[in-house]
Image (cartoon, rainbow, N blue to C red):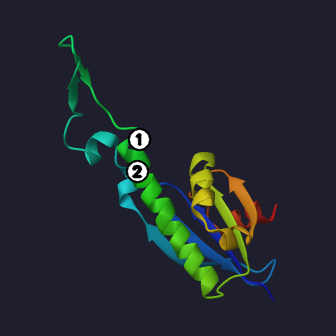
Amino acid sequence: METTWILVADRSKAKLFESKEPGKPLQHVQDILHPEGHLHSQDIVSDKPGRIFTSFGERHGFSGHHEPTENVTRQFTLHLADFLNDGRNAHSYEKLVLVAEPGFLGELLNALNGETSKLVSKTIKKDLMHLKTGDLQQYVAG
């Protein structure tokens, strides 16, 4: 009997479910919260971007390459990837199903190490955090 982990995630939280037998109800294992995922850029950074001056005396706003919300999201994807990698190392599951909106799912897939990536049996590119467990099970099975 293979154990499948189903991770349903968005930028502010993730829910982990486990399935040991097809057709049996999913078991909720854990919630992983990331409240910073709800914040907006202006809530994350308190200072305005720095200013640069050209040789002609003109001022321009200086901004980094990434928005602060992108950095917060990246931190969460790395945290989730570490969690999933640790679960694989502990032999807690043999298959992995990932469910998230497309952009977040792509970042999460990129954050997984090679061995964990091999266990991904299905990806669903939708935000399904709002679904009840039974509805999620039907969606994942379908």
Q: To which quarter of the image does residue 45 belong?
A: top left
Q: What percent of the width, then of the height, locates residue 101?
A: 61, 49
Q: CA distance from mark 1 to mark 2?
A: 7 Å
Q: To which quarter of the image does residue 115 belong?
A: bottom right
Q: What percent of the width, then of the height, locates residue 4?
A: 72, 77
- Crowdedness near tag 1: few (<14), some (14–19) or many (≥20) residues, C-alpha within 10 Å: few
**Pointer 2 residue:** 71
Q: What percent of the width, then of the height, locates residue 83?
A: 52, 75
Is 22 situated above or below 56? below
Q: Nearer the viewer, residue 107 or 31?
A: 107
Circles 1 and 2: CB distance less than 8 Å? Answer: yes
The residue at the point 33 percent across, 41 percent down is 41
Q: Please give the label number shown on residue 122.
A: none
Q: What percent of the width, then of the height, locates residue 125?
A: 68, 51
The residue at the point 21 percent across, 10 percent down is 56
The residue at the point 45 percent across, 61 percent down is 76
Q: Would residue 2 appear left or right of 104 to someone viewing this image?
A: right
Q: SS at mark 1?
A: loop
Identify the amino acid type marked 2: Asn
Visible residue check, residue 134:
no
**Pointer 1 residue:** 66
The residue at the point 52 percent across, 77 percent down is 30
Q: Nearer the viewer, residue 41 or 10?
A: 41
Q: Would residue 140 appear left or right of 51 to someone viewing this image?
A: right
Q: Nearer the viewer, residue 107 or 4?
A: 107
Q: To which quarter of the image does residue 18 belong?
A: bottom right
Is 110 situated above or below 25? above
Identify the amino acid type marked 1: His
